[in-house]
């Protein structure tokens, strides 16, 4: 059968909707996306949902939403809103392609390259145990491999349950893969026995539907994680059986945690949805994961997606594992966050402030000023919560840790002087210079200094004797709020 491989680059990201989008999956999607954009090709989103027990619509929705959040948008696949097919080569969900897989499985059965196998799980396990005891590879040795198709169909008609297995015993040779990342990889054919391509219920297994889909969807390149490398031999055998051209393969190194183990959720957030909740920016996530296994030719660290597209080259992918350094990730996010215009950053922190039901001034000038003051103290968007909390009147309470300060002899005089001087201010907000001058006036009026001066004022502003720098906070708090808080503090004495 003639190959249908595309004359221009076509790549795909093919997640299984059995959970969240992991940063490893996001990196695979990103590299495919960058390769497509760099080469004027197409990036396709295919959904590998043949695991009926674990695939859910909720997971599919989550994966699609995370891809949209990261702005890794696809030319064909499931619609990001309706999850319906978009593109000429669908369906793009494997669960909806069973008739297609059956047609190609029948081709292999009719050509004698596959057969129906009626072995039970118990029989297979017994064979496996005997092979291991004898020191042989535990490959299935099916008594049904020489049955005629008519014999097998007759047994099925009587109610026999069969899987379809691919025949490997005549393929005695080495299969050689020129991997775009790892170089030449050699697979002896006897690494695998006769493997299942269709389960007894008719649902295909991964290796079979992957080949059929990649061929029919005209994929030119398949870039995926190195854990898929062992699958490649079976896939090469299936390509060969149909006489189809192999796409170019590239298997990318794993992402490792700080202990050099495969990155897992036990060590902290590795789900894109959780990173979003913690306040990482999509641009920073893409920048960080791009550098987990690839490097910019000029050694650039902070990059936009456009920078990455221009510089991306598969030859720069590293085949050794990359360490997921959370400290560096946070630093990189801070760089992206601080590069945002103030208005964009204000917009980005709104969901975090809303979560805490904060009531803050709606004045754009105040918002801009607050962002200018707080931006240097933010690494992730969620940091805005603690920074803005003291500005929210409803959050103001005098905490038990202020009890000792409230008992000091100078405290009442300091708080009274503070209240009176704030009341005399002509404007609604004071500047940082006005605050420092006013603090000095309290000191001159009361004779209090050091902690006897600063701690009572801090209690009157944020409800506790330790915390944020007042010269940053006070210029953002209305005079009326400062007076109400000072009265509350005085009432505690």
Image (cartoon, rainbow, N blue to C red):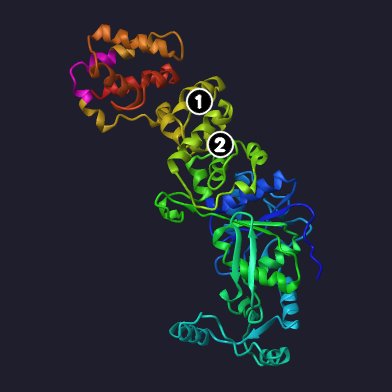
Residue 46, magenta (yes or no): no
Please report the residue visible at 43 percent of the width from the left and 84 percent of the height from the top. 133
Q: Which mark is residue 488?
A: none
Dot 1 corresponds to which residue? 371
Image quadrant assignment for residue 237: bottom right
Quarter of the picture containing the C terminus is top left
Taking 489 as reference, is 234 left or right?
right
Q: Which residues are magenta?
A: 405-416
Taking 267 as reference, is 408 left or right?
left
Q: Is residue 109 above or below residue 482?
A: below
Residue 240: percent from left, percent from top: 71, 71
Taking 2 as reference, is 157 left or right?
left
Within 10 Å of the Cα at label 1, are there few (<14), some (14-19), or many (20+) other Cα atoms? many
Image quadrant assignment for residue 457: top left
Residue 423: percent from left, percent from top: 38, 11
Of residues 334 and 274, the one nearer the viewer is 334
Dot 2 corresponds to which residue? 299
Quarter of the picture containing the N terminus is bottom right
Q: Secondary structure at mark 2?
A: loop
């Amino acid at each position: 059968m003639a190959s249908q491989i595309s004359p221009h680059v076509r790549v795909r990201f093919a997640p299984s909707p059995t959970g969240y989008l992991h940063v490893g999956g996001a990196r695979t999607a990103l590299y495919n996306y960058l390769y497509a954009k760099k080469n004027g090709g197409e990036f396709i989103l295919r959904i590998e949902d043949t695991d009926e027990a674990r695939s859910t619509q909720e997971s599919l929705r989550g994966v699609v939403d995370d891809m949209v959040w990261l702005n890794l948008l696809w030319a064909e696949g499931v619609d990001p809103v309706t999850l319906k097919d978009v593109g000429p080569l669908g369906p793009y969900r494997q669960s909806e392609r069973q008739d297609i897989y059956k047609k190609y499985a029948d081709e292999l059965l009719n050509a004698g390259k596959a057969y129906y196998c009626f072995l039970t799980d118990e029989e297979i396990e017994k064979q496996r145990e005997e092979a291991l005891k004898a020191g042989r590879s535990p490959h299935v040795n099916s008594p049904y491999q020489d049955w005629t198709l008519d014999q097998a169909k007759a047994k099925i008609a009587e109610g026999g349950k069969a899987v379809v297995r691919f025949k490997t015993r005549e393929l005695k040779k080495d299969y050689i893969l020129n991997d775009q990342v790892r170089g030449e990889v050699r697979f002896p054919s006897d690494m695998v026995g006769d493997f299942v391509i269709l389960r007894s219920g008719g649902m295909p297994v991964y290796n079979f539907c992957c080949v059929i889909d990649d061929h029919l969807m005209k994929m030119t390149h398949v870039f995926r994680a190195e854990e898929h490398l062992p699958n490649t031999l079976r896939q090469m055998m299936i390509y060969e059986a149909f006489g189809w051209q192999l796409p170019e393969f590239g298997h990318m190194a794993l992402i490792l945690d700080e202990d050099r183990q495969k990155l897992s959720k036990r060590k902290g957030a590795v789900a894109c949805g959780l990173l979003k909740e913690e306040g990482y920016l999509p641009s920073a996530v893409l920048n960080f994961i791009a550098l987990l296994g690839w490097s910019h030719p000029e050694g650039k660290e902070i990059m936009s997606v456009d920078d990455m597209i221009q510089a991306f080259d598969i030859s720069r992918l590293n085949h050794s594992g990359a360490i997921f350094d959370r400290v560096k990730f946070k630093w990189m996010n801070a760089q992206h966050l601080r590069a945002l215009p103030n208005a964009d950053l204000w917009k980005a922190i709104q969901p975090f402030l809303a979560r805490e039901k904060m009531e803050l001034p709606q004045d754009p000038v105040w918002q801009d000023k607050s962002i200018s003051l707080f931006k240097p103290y933010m690494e992730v968007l969620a940091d805005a919560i603690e920074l803005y909390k003291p500005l929210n009147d409803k959050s103001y309470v005098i905490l038990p840790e202020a009890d000792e300060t409230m008992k000091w002899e100078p405290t009442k005089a300091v708080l009274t002087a503070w209240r009176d001087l704030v009341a005399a201010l002509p404007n609604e907000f004071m500047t940082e210079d006005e605050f420092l001058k006013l603090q000095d006036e309290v000191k001159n009026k009361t004779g209090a200094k050091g902690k006897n001066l600063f701690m009572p004022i801090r209690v009157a502003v944020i409800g506790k004797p330790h915390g944020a720098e007042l010269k940053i906070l006070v210029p953002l708090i209305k005079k009326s709020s400062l007076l109400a808080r000072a009265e509350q503090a005085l009432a505690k004495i």
